[in-house]
Amino acid sequence: MNKKMRLRIMVSTGIVCVLSMIMIVFTNTQQQAKVHGMITIQPTTEKAQETIAAKKVEKRVKKKKKKASLFSKKYKKITVIKVSDEAATQNTDDNVSDEIAEIYKQKSLSSQEAGVALDGCVVKVLSKDKNWTKVKSGKVEGYVDSKYVVKGAKAKKVLFDTDHIVAKMNKSNTMIKGNKSQKSPNIGIAYAKTTYPIIEISKNEKWVKIKRTDTLSGWIPASSMTLKIEKEYAYTSDEYDEMVESEWKAVAGTYKLEKSKLPKSGEARELIEYASKFLGNRYVWGGTSLTKGADCSGFVQSVFRHFGYRLNRTAAEQSRNGKSVSNNQLKPGDLLFYHTDRRQKNRISHVAIYIGNGKIIHAANRRAGIIISNMGNPCAARRILTGKKENKKEKIKIDKSLGKNKKQKNKENYKKQNEEETTKVIETTQSTETVEQQETTRVESETTDEEVREWLDELKE
């Protein structure tokens, strides 16, 4: 091979090496550009490098930044009281109070009461064990049954159910939509700087369903409002009694039952007369006993149960029993419901039995007990009585039968015991007793039978 040939080979090899190096550099530059989101070769000027660095930082921030939830961290950690239970309220025998959880000064049901907490009341947990939780809420500090204390998702649901989660509207009016879409028809207006209870929040948290009135609910953009929790705290015993009494405070005087103004006959008259037997008895939180004490719905439940009607346990649940009636169509025996919670004015928290002529009979509060008072301003009314007496007649018939059997049995036992005692007297005195003494014993026995008959007549009355 001559020198020219070798030279050509060396030049060709050199050119190939140079081209290979250029290709390698170009490939690496493209890969770096892809990593940094660029499609051009990385600039080498200082200004261009600063621009690229700034874009990288901005892109990383966008990736890390997430949309803030409508519920802030402080709301996620909130702890509340949950009293009402759908399963429990369906059981009419369950001793569930009217959305009330008693707070005691010591870990005992017999301890003195420190106050009461309603459904949705916010509490701070100080200590907790399996049975008792020590809480502080407002002016009240004490122990509450641990089953009433919930947090997290359960607490959020309670706050929704009790209208404690609200939307505070921004500075401009907002149209309420029928569905979660701007194209949906307008059904109302959410007014600026006004607060509305929130019913539901869409999964993407872009839409919020609010309740403007009892008959108008719809969707608004989440951007048009600020979510807030209207915190309610526990009440002292005196505060709660004053609150419950507020509906009829102006007519604090109580009344006697005027039978002449009741229906002349029928189920309503019998029910009201029966309820009036317990006037003056105690009001007891969570109680259902007509003699030992009952709260408002416990009193109503027990009175109606006597006539064969099974109602739910709390006032709020009873407001869905029977059928709705307007205040200008009330009849004796109807149930009247009240908003007595000053902080949550939409909460149904009291129930009474209408007896006619603007009067009600009810377990008012711990101060008054079971009384008759003016009806005040009820927020709703329900009709429970059907006017049909089949079940009632059957119940009364059974009761009378049981009563007669019991009376007959008592009479037979009394006679048997009397005859045995008389026989013993005769046997022990037979040897010395004269005919006159025997006659006296017979007369005494007849007298005793007469007393039995009088006693039975009194029972019948």
Image (spheres, grey):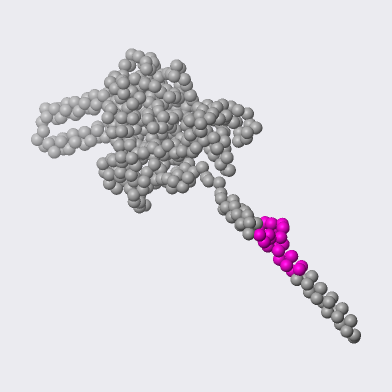
Can you give x and y, in whole percent of width and height, for residue 233 in the image? 36, 39
Front residue of 321/339: it is 339
Among the 4 quarters of the image, the one containing residue 432:
top left
Front residue of 276/76: it is 76
Image vertical order of residue 18 relative to residue 201, above or below: below
Q: Is residue 335 left or right of residue 364?
A: right
Can you give x and y, in whole percent of width and height, for residue 237 in the image? 29, 35
Residue 405 seen from this side = no
Residue 338 seen from this side = yes
Residue farthest to the left, as pictured: 432
How many numbered discs, if any? Answer: 0
Can you give x and y, in whole percent of width and height, for residue 276 in the image? 32, 24
The region drawn magenta spans 22-45
- In the rendered structure, does residue 33 fall within the stretch colored magenta? yes
The structure residue drawn at horizontal position 65% and vertical position 32%, both measured from the top left corner, is 183
Front residue of 127/455: it is 127
Image vertical order of residue 114 relative to residue 388, above or below: below
Q: Quadrant of the N terminus?
A: bottom right
Can you give x and y, in whole percent of width and height, for residue 328 in the image? 45, 16
- In the rendered structure, does residue 62 fall within the stretch colored magenta? no
Among the 4 quarters of the image, the one containing residue 448:
top left
Q: Quadrant of the C terminus?
A: top left
The structure residue drawn at horizontal position 40% and vertical position 38%, both measured from the top left corner, is 231
The structure residue drawn at horizontal position 35% and vertical position 14%, both measured from the top left corner, is 261
